[in-house]
Amino acid sequence: MSSEKEYVEMLDRLYSKLPEKGRKEGTQALPNLIIFNIGNTTMIRNFAEYCDRIRREDKICMKYLLKELAAPGNVDDKGELIIQGKFSSQVINTLMERFLKAYVECSTCKSLDTILKKEKKSWYIVCLACGAQTPVKPL
């Protein structure tokens, strides 16, 4: 019995020294999208910075967002996305969260540290944290 008690005490001591396990998203804080409505257009001021942070080309993010909004738009030379039409920041943030879940977040470890890779006609999310490779629907 004493060896079992010692074992449990050593385990407790070990677990008390381990750091608290945090969620992976906390390590990579994403910037909030700065969204303005000017007349009948919507502008996302820090779109290029946001795309850089999630390691995706702004063309891919723009294509997804414009397709979901069913609106024309383009990225200007300052990295701002200009969308023809008036959309609320809540709608745009919800769509970007869906994009993160579908095309950025690792399905295995939930890390945002991923890259999007295309092999032949297939798209894959490759996780830089755990090495998992997950197929995704083409954009």
Image (cartoon, rainbow, N blue to C red):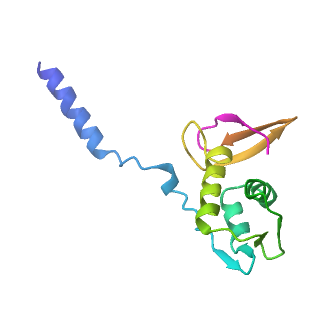
x, y (%) of residue 23?
Answer: 45, 49
Which residue of the protein is positioned furthest toward the top in this rendering? 1
Say which residue appears at 74% left-offset and 45% top-offset.
116
Q: Is residue 89 above or below residue 4?
A: below
Q: Main secondary structure of the magenta part?
A: loop
User: Looking at the image, which residue is at 83% across and 73% down?
Assistant: 76
Residue 94 versus residue 48 in the image, above or below: above
* Left or right, 48 with reference to 32: right
* Residue in front for this viewpoint, 76 or 28: 76
**Residue 61 percent across, percent down from the top left:** 75, 57
- Quarter of the rendering containing residue 75: bottom right
Q: Quadrant of residue 121?
A: top right
Q: Residue at x 70, y 55 (%)?
A: 55
Q: Position of residue 39 (x, y in %)?
A: 73, 81
Count how many numbered circles sit on residues in the image: 0
In magenta, the rendered stretch is 129-139
Magenta span contains residue 15: no
- Given residues 38 and 50, the one toward you in this image is 38
Image quadrant of residue 96?
A: bottom right
Relative placement, left or right, of 102 versus 2 is right
* Left-right relation of 114 to 85: left
Furthest residue in direction bottom, as rendered: 39
Viewport quadrant of the C terminus: top right
Q: Position of residue 129 (x, y in %)?
A: 59, 43
* The N terminus sits in image quarter: top left
